[in-house]
Amino acid sequence: MKRNIFLLFIQELTSLPLWVKQVILVYLKKDLESYLSEDLISMDEDKIFHIFRPTISKLGMDELDKKNEDYSQDIYDFLYNCANNLSILEMSIEKKYSMEDISKLFMFCYNKQYIKTDIPVQVLAIAMFISGECMTGEYFQKIGKLSEEQTNIILEQQNEQKKHGQHTKFAELMVENGFVELKDIKSLITLKEEAQRKAVLDFLYAYKK
């Protein structure tokens, strides 16, 4: 049976002496704080997209079994991994996908109702943002950090600017109006940029042999 390479990586980390793990934590915390907002750093585990374990639906199971739609193998691999209770992160490492790749597969299966749709708001919002299905402003609306009233204020400002041949991005106006912190936006954009990278941990296989 194939080993879960991410769990192997975690086991290697957690087997280190306590004093080493403490130092690693200090360095990781400093690194994360340099580009992530406090909201993203302290987010509850069940709201983090990468940790989420999608559940295959009956419709998804039927498609996985019969392959009536003749999708690409990536779709069926994703559904197979959902059926085997893998997390998003485990899937991406297993198949050497970037987080952007896996978010697009996730959203495709979500829109087709091949996975169960009772998904935490924050999980769905970040999947939509990374996959390109929603913009920065929409993301903050979905997680409840930008109200409908605030959205309308920004849209009115943009319309006024348009009359004078000017344009300010929605995200910039969110900050100028004090609706969202600049670091919240920067950390979200950084997360999307980092989502294009792949996490390759194959060196652990050689290490354990």
Image: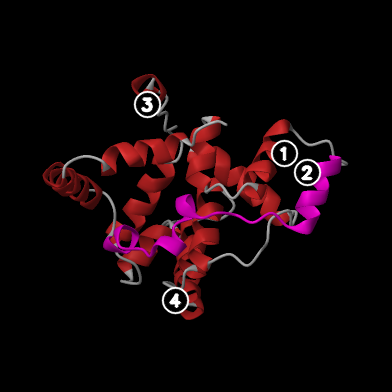
Identify the residue shown where x is 46% and y is 73%.
Answer: 144
In this rendering, the label closer to the viewer, 4 or 3? 3
Range shown magenta? 38-67
* Relative to 171, residue 80 above or below: above
Coordinates of residue 106 in the picture (x, y in percent) = 62, 48
Q: Secondary structure at mark 4?
A: helix
Q: Earlier in the sequence, mark 4 or mark 1?
A: 1
Q: Earlier in the sequence, mark 2 or mark 3?
A: 2
Alpha-carbon neighbours of circle 4 within 10 Å: few (<14), some, or many (≥20)?
some
* Amino acid tagged 1: Tyr
- In space, the residues marked 4 and 1 are separated at their CA atoms by 41 Å
Tag 1 residue: 76
Residues tagged 3 and 1 counted as in contact (Cβ below 8 A) = no
Tag 4 residue: 150
Q: Which mark is residue 64?
A: 2
Q: Secondary structure at mark 3?
A: helix
- In space, the residues marked 2 and 1 are separated at their CA atoms by 6 Å
* Amino acid tagged 4: Gln
Q: Secondary structure at mark 2?
A: helix
Instruction: Using the rendered view, name the quadrant where residue 119 is placed.
Output: bottom right
- In space, the residues marked 3 and 1 are separated at their CA atoms by 27 Å
- Magenta span dominant secondary structure: helix
Pick the quarter of the image with the N terminus: top right
In this rendering, the label closer to the viewer, 2 or 4? 2
Q: Is residue 163 visible?
A: no
Coordinates of residue 190 in the picture (x, y in percent) = 36, 45
Identify the residue shown where x is 30% and y is 36%.
Answer: 12
Residues tagged 2 and 1 counted as in contact (Cβ below 8 A) = yes
In this rendering, the label closer to the viewer, 2 or 3? 3
Q: Which mark is residue 204?
A: 3
Q: Earlier in the sequence, mark 3 or mark 1?
A: 1
